Amino acid sequence: MSESLEDLRSQITEISLELVRLLNERAAIALKIGAAKRKQGHSNLYDPIREAKLLKQLLEASEGPLADDALAHLFKEVFKTSLALQVEDAHKQLLVESKRATAVHIGPVSFGEAPVIIAGPCAIETEEQITEIFAFLSGLDVQIVRAGAFKPRTSPYDFQGLGIDGLKMASRIAKQYGLLLVSEIMDADSLEEALPYLDAVQIGARNMQNFSLLKAAGAINKPIILKRGLSATIEEFTLAAEYIVASGNDQVILCERGIRTFETATRNTLDISAVAILKERLELPIIVDVSHAAGRKDILLPLAKAGIAVGGDGIMIETHPQPSIALSDAQQQLNMTEFASFYRELKKFINEVKK
Ligand SMILES: O=C(O)C(=O)C[C@]1(C(=O)O)C=C[C@@H](O)C=C1
């Protein structure tokens, strides 16, 4: 007995409704695939090989009456639609804005809880200098030290750093005192060689948009301290961090270190609003480098307090056994007596804020 037109229409309506449900279910999964691809650092959401494979499988499974061409046409539209959804979703929320699964750590030190103080000389100069300052800092209970081996200097005639040999020496002495070492790496090529000697890699202000270095930093499993570029907007700073996270490394700590303005009383202008805004917007910890922001010694403590007061997760500061003979940044590094007083006062402030 032939089915009535009404019956057939009701069947086709049922199937269409089921197709709508299935297409939406499929789209929801495509969105999850897009997010997983971004998390793994895939720079391209479009995957023609995957599409071709799946299409082949679908055509092989088809028993007609739809012709292969018709089916292929329909599914290419489906793929195009899920890709468009994935792209739209990627622009809606950056990885650095989404809830983190893991906290950011340098060794056992966790960022985002109690503020962390990272201190040390601008540059690694001699074995005696590093031994003296690291022994002093470990005596104060500082856990993470900074010291530069590759120095990005404005003038090619200024001290350029001791390079990998300096880093090896500083790493050995840091270990001897149970300290964790952070140092700046300037290019992707040096990263691999330097990695065994570092507990965290610093990407400096001048390299904030060195995209090959950002991608290389995303491919390692050591934490990255990313400093804000001298003239970078908050958006550019955010996207630089997104490069690292999208390339596979979510262990990123931002560092506000002052930006270039018309003001000459300080070396740079500490952008305290940026700290508050980034804390509110992103799921990444942010620390404040008071030495590079100020370029002078006398206002470091109030700047550090301000950084903590607006929600900063830590402070970076330069200290040297004999600042007057330092090979770089002589005017902004604290001597050990000055640092001990800074450290004591800042700790006191941190404890008061916690109450
Ligand atoms: O499998 C993937 O990688 C997807 O992103 C899903 C999907 C799809 O809709 O099937 C979407 C876009 C890609 O170009 C390939 C396939």
Image (cartoon, rainbow, N blue to C red):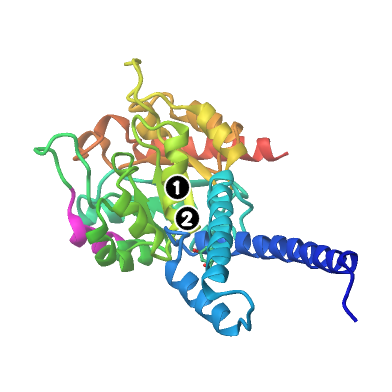
Q: Which region is colored magenta?
A: 161-170
Which SS does the magenta portion mostly show? helix
Q: Spot the residue most to the left.
A: 157
Is the C-beta separation of discs 2 and 1 under 8 Å?
Answer: yes
Would residue 36 be seen by someone viewing this image from the given angle? no
Inspect the magenta stretch and tell me whether residue 313 lies in it: no
Where residue 144 sits: x, y (%)? 44, 54
Q: What is the CA distance from the residue labelled 2 to the residue labelled 1?
A: 6 Å
Quadrant of the snapshot with the C terminus: top right
Q: Which residue is mark 2?
A: 245
The residue lying at 58 percent from left, 56 percent from top is 81
Q: Is residue 140 above or below residue 301?
A: below
Identify which amino acid the numbered label 1 is placed on.
Answer: Ala
Viewer-proximal residue, 71 or 294? 71
Secondary structure of residue under mark 2: helix
Q: Is residue 68 above or below residue 98?
A: below
Would residue 89 be seen by someone viewing this image from the given angle? yes
**On residue 241, which mark appears?**
1
Inspect the magenta stretch and tell me whether residue 169 lies in it: yes
Q: Is residue 167 above or below residue 346?
A: below
The residue lying at 57 percent from left, 70 percent from top is 71
Where residue 126 sits: x, y (%)? 20, 53
